[in-house]
Amino acid sequence: MPNTLSSSCLKMDEPSTSSDPCKKLSYSIHSYSSYLPTYIPENILQNNQEDQSSRWSSISNSPPQYLILKLQNASIVKTIKFGKYERPHVCNLKRFKIYGGLEDDTKIELLYSGLSNNSDLETFNLRHTIENNSMIPVRYIKLEPLESWGSNFNYSLWYVELHGIDDPHLISCEITKFYRHREETLIRLCLKHFRRNHYDVAANALLQNSNIVLEHPFLSQIYDTIVVNGNYEMAEMLMDQAINDGYLEGYMKSQSFKPIWNLVKEYHNAGNKRPCMRGGHQMCIDSAAGNVYLLGGWDGHKDLSDLWSFNIATGIWHCIATNVEKDGGPSPRSCHKVCIDTERKQIFVLGRFCEVQSFIGEYPQSDFYVYDIEQNHWTLICADTNLMGGPKLLFDHQMVMDSISSTIYVFGGRVVVSSSRCGSDETQKNNPDFSGFYKYHVPTNTWTCILPDTFHEIKVQDGLLTHNPQTVASRGGHSILLHTKMRRIYIFGGHRQRWAQKCPEFLWYDIETGLTQAMPMPSTVDKPPMGYTQRATIDIDHDEIYVLSSLSKEKDRREDKVQNAFWVYFIKQNKWICIYKNYNSDEQYWNKMQHLEPCPRFAYQLVYDQKNKIHYLFGGNPGKTDAQNLRLDDFWELKVYRCTNVKLRNQCKLLIRKFKFQEIKKKDKIAAMQFLQTSVSELIDHSDEEQTREFQGTAALLFKDDNQTGDVAEQIHEWRCTLFDKLCDFFPNSMVQPKENLVDLIPL
């Protein structure tokens, strides 16, 4: 089975080849904590999914429990793959850690994550680089279970596979670089310790003999300004300069965003018309013109064919047509997809849901329409895209428009008319066909299949699944996003039948080169939940992807009972953060919150105003078991507030002035009170309860008895060093002194 998280780039129409330097690595069992009879550690070398006894099982769950694997050769281990029993099992690892190193007492943490309690193979990316971009060579891998899915059950591992690089010449070079990095880090730790403790002669001698610098010269200037000279005013000026020079950009991007939901302000039009309740509808947005468009959907009883526009500036809904079919447009439908060409003011419509299990007569065709916004005119591009080399009739697919090349990209979705959905075999019906990856060139009216469905031809041979060895699997209910500047299409999430290989959760396709690459996803707790209810958008200015996840259709997909969650993915940093979660599932709670925050739902739509940086959400299905036909018609806007230069300047100044206040208080409490009431107070947002409480706590220090013994000058030196350490947190790790302290490394 191919590695779905390979870091190499592959052509979409070419399988992985043996020339890929990342390969399966051989290993043996070096040592272990314990094992039960018959459940020996060597069992993890074979992937016998059907054999319940083919596993390692610890004799208890009392720590420490572990397995240490010894690689045949020192290697760079990039990924680890876990096989599991064919059914969920209480002994599967809910949490674990992986360590690696060149010795068997390894202490370098490579991964902290957990396995899903199912039968899927799971592949994880291991940490294999360090700060200077050199790699981490390892000979030993330590697997340390921390928690099983069943409470108080022993730990079990069924199968472990390692992938990486073991080229002798490359590894030899990396080992040399690794040891050099360790020595440089040790010297920098010594320099930090010597400087902080006034061992100036020793620090200067070490600097001259090693030619290793402790930090970026700008940080050394800040250290001298604060710690040596106590010049707090100059420190504020230097932090202003750091912000202007872009040193703190990484910190600003990593800060917690503040999402704020509000019901969209709608103003009455003639007759107070607005879209009715619905789910499975489609929306698109023209940010430049300030218009949101909405087409069709399911109102709980029937498909709809109305077309609406909402003008953001006026706050007014306009019904363009109550039934576009009468105007030559598509028939009533839901689970279709639309995309907009904002340059040419055209909206394209493809696909729809259609029940065909008991269909009699001619199968429905995959019609394809375009709506000219300025001319208010519908055109049937073709009656059946399948006859033009495009996809069959499908639903739960996704498509995006590249206005630069006038090309539409369509990926995935379930095929409505297929042998599996129309046949009599129940196994086939439960595992529907999926559509591949297509593009449509508008000027030439030409469809091209970029990649057929990876698992279109799946066979069972000798009890094993075999399939087309491509790197991308189609799916349904996913998201695809176009980054027009990078010329990339990002594919995220979605579902596929359980018995096929697990889809890569996150990948991109390069429009210019045709290359595809799977993106590494973090542990189960540090990523958005996969499924049908996530909606994703992209900001090409900030290079960020936003994911809103909500109610799940499948009960076993409700991860940790999260109902609403909003995630941000930083493309350049390859980092996910969750900026909002609401675990509440109580109906009374959501009734109270109906004007403050959208309730959990599926079959909703989300669009992003690139110009004004606002998300718009409309409608959906709240999933109420006692009202299965109920749909929603609420219209929300989501603004995400982020750290700005002004806010960061105030934050840095406030931090510096609080430490200055502490130093003044040590010498003159009256002067300290005056400084607090003026210089500190002016930076406080007194309408913010948290800031006000913190300010009051700082003021209370004036009345605290300072009966501290010891050298006052040494106490002030420690305060200044602490302030410098806190300011270092704003800078990237590549610029600052080591975070660790030399004394913390000494075993006692």
Image (cartoon, rainbow, N blue to C red):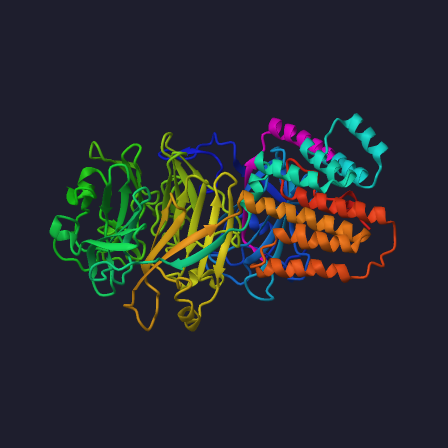
Name above or below for residue 446 compared with residue 623.
Answer: above
Q: How far from the left and from the top, in percent, is residue 177? A: 67, 30
**166 to the left or right of 317:** right
Write down the quadrant of residue 181 in the picture. Answer: top right
Residue 687 appears in the figure: yes
Point out residue 305 in the picture as x, y percentages from the top left corner. 19, 55
Residue at screen point 47% across, 48% down: 568
Left-right relation of 10 to 80: left
Residue 226: in magenta span: no
Span of residues in magenta: 156-184
Image quarter in which the N terminus is found: top left
Comparing 175 with 226, the one in front is 226
* Residue 143 versus residue 486 in the image, above or below: below
Pick the front one: 375 or 668:
668
Asked if residue 371 is positioned above or below residue 120 in the image, the reply reads: above
- The x, y position of residue 718, in whole percent, is 79, 47
Residue 500 visible (yes or no):
no
- The correct choice, above or below, for 376 with respect to 511 in the image is below
Within the image, what quadrant is residue 619 found in? bottom left
Q: Nearer the viewer, residue 65 or 304?
A: 304
Residue 454 lies left or right of residue 223; in this view the side is: left
- Residue situated in front as seen by the camera: 323 or 178: 323
Q: Quadrant of residue 231?
A: top right
Q: In the drawing, does residue 743 fall left or right of residue 687? A: right
The residue shown at (33%, 44%) is 287
Q: Residue at x 27, y 68 (%)?
A: 629
Residue 604 image position (x, y, % from top left): 33, 57
Q: Quick check: is 177 in the magenta stretch? A: yes
Residue at the right extreme, as displayed: 710
